[in-house]
Amino acid sequence: AGGIERHQYDVVVIGAGGAGLRAAIAAQEAGARTAIVCKSLLGKAHTVMAEGGIAAAMGNRWPEDNWEVHFRDTMRGGKMLNNWRMAQLHAQEAPERVMELEDWGALFDRTEDGLISQRDFGGHKYARLAHVGDRTGLEMIRTLQQRAFQLGIDVFMECTVTELLKDADGNGRIAGAFGYWRETGRFVVFEAPSVVLATGGIGKSFKVTSNSWEYTGDGHALALRAGASLINMEFVQFHPTGMVWPPSVKGLLVTESVRGDGGVLKNAEGKRFMFDYIPEYFKAETADTVEEADRWYDDKKNNRRPPELLPRDEVARAINSEIKAGRGSPHGGIYLDIASRRTPEFIRKRLPSMYHQFKELADVDITAEPMEIGPTCHYVMGGVEVDPDTELSAVPGLYAVGECSGGMHGSNRLGGNSLSDLLVFGRRAGAAAASYSDGLGGSRPAIAEQDVKAAEQSALAPFEVEGGENPYTIQQDLQQSMNDLVGIIREGAELERSLAEIEAFKERASRMKVEGHRQYNPGWHLSIDLRNMLIVSEAIAKAALAREESRGGHTRNDFPGPDPVWGSKNLVVTLNADGTGVELTEKPLPEMPDELKKYFE
Ligand code: FAD
């Protein structure tokens, strides 16, 4: 391993989304020599796609709002499975983190009084989302990147981490990370006593997702292989309306405003089917005739809401049932029709970006014909199990923040609570990682050369295979299988089948082959990502099979309601003894102190 490029830092942050940037800023400010490593170009992280805003109880619109109400909303939204301490810190600190972004130059939309404006969102009692038009994520990323540059943080972009490295003396501490440059395929070693995982989500394990190619669960898998644990993995959020056609844009988000502005859902028989899916719980507030539903758009006071505007999980489940019953569209979705209900002028004015999105990407004119849409995998609540105050995992020196960490959102995340999560816990993790490195003094961990060699061999293995299968077919089969068997509605027998299929994919992946050289080779990159996708998929399927109830982002046909016994425990995922798969243990939720319990009485 003598020839490998090496760098030494106090803190290495893997990921340049909101979580990674905020962590790196905190670490560097605390005096640690800090680097950010990211798989794509800086500025391309997922955070940039966030539209709605950052949830923070600033009370600018509603003086009644405060951290206690935000805390309560978050816990109820997560069906009480959230780590209470994380939900508390998040609600308490989010307003300061937003103000700080403003100090660093973020230009938020304003109220009439010149305060940061806040907008309404599902599950939040008061208007609470600080925003910048519908491009909040872009402004957040821009501001954090500028701050990171000012502080002189080093950035390694288009550099993918494939393994975490541990201390050579065998005491289990983190010692650094191993990766490759995407362009040249050359390897690189980062030596650092603190590593912060901020790699985002897992959406690419599913065929249909709003997530980009980067979301292969790398941080989740790296953590598992390094000896850390994951929680909440059975909870995956599906958004009801993503594009299903053409394949190149499958899963891309279609905003809820289409339905808010009059769009309705129809099956292949032309039937407006949502009236068949109004759950008992929402009957009182939902229109049960087409006439009443249609009157609501002009007279919201005297009519009940159309069933197309039920909460996201209800709509997504209904769409899924229609497709499963064989009443889907040619490309496996259903129809979202606004063309027959509103004039072209109205649609172009109210939904300009949706109009362009479909025109340019699908060659569909949404003013003239319906859109084909279907549920899309959007967000993973599950992630690395961390200490709520410091974001430290079970491995000394290894921290996790943002979408790749677990606990904060319990079984379901509220809109806007991700961007605030990145800021609050990014700052905490960066500060803790810097302080840990600083406290080590002369007793820093060292990387074992045989571990570097092993990481190198493991990355190159697919070049050595004779006559194996290419990773793309395995990836496609995995995505299809996860979509069909571990999707929005689950059932014991299907989950068992999915686990058997995942075993078969793992077996095929052990013999996968890539062609060509190490210079920019997407097939090779995928072969490395695929190992992560497989282990993360197994974690999701196993936890989903074990949790015999329905709660938040986890719906079991065979266990339709929530179960108080399951409501008091987490499923913890760890790597099994021989490293070939994952295993589960049950763990009681941390006990909420009495002074917080009072909010739920
Ligand atoms: P990311 O921003 O995804 O960053 C991950 C980083 O990790 C990237 O830089 C990537 O290159 C890097 N990385 C990954 N693997 C590796 C590796 N192996 N080696 C090196 N680098 C690696 N949330 C809200 O709160 N409000 C919203 O309005 C909102 N809107 C959304 C709209 C869309 C379309 C989507 C998809 C999500 C939305 N969300 C929203 C969710 C939110 O955007 C994400 O949960 C959040 O941005 C995740 O941030 P992150 O920092 O954890 O990860």
Image (cartoon, rainbow, N blue to C red):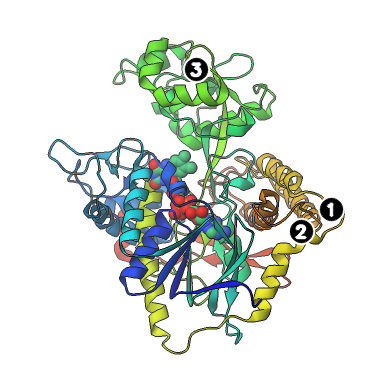
Rate crowding at label 2 as few (under 14), some (14 to 19) or many (20 or more) other CA atoms within 10 Å.
many
**C-alpha gap between disc 3 and disc 2:** 45 Å
Q: Position of residue 346 (x, y in %)?
A: 37, 14
Q: Residue at x 39, y 21 (%)?
A: 261
Q: Secondary structure at mark 3?
A: loop
Q: Is residue 471 left or right of residue 488?
A: right
Instruction: Tell which tag, 3 or 2, sits nearer the viewer.
Output: 2
Numbered badge on residue 486? none
Q: Quadrant of the N terminus?
A: bottom right
Q: Which residue is mark 2?
A: 462
Q: Residue 104: x percent and y percent?
A: 25, 54
Frontmost residue, 11 versus 254: 11
Amino acid type of the residue tagged 3 in the rendering: Ile
* Tag 3 and tag 2, C-beta contact below 8 Å: no
> Mark 2 and mark 1: span between their CA atoms?
9 Å
Please name the residue that numbered disc 1 is placed on.
468
> Quick one: which residue is furthest to the right in this view?
467
- Identify residue for label 3: 366
Binning the other alpha carbons within 10 Å of mark 1 as few (below 14), some (14 to 19) or many (20 upward) gives some
Q: Nearer the viewer, residue 470 or 123?
A: 470
Where does residue 217 sit, x and y in percent of width and height? 58, 55
| Residue 52 in sight | yes
* Rendered position, 359 above or below 251: above
First reached walking from the N terminus: tag 3 or tag 1: 3
Disc 1 on helix, strand or loop? loop
Q: Residue at x 62, y 81 (%)?
A: 448
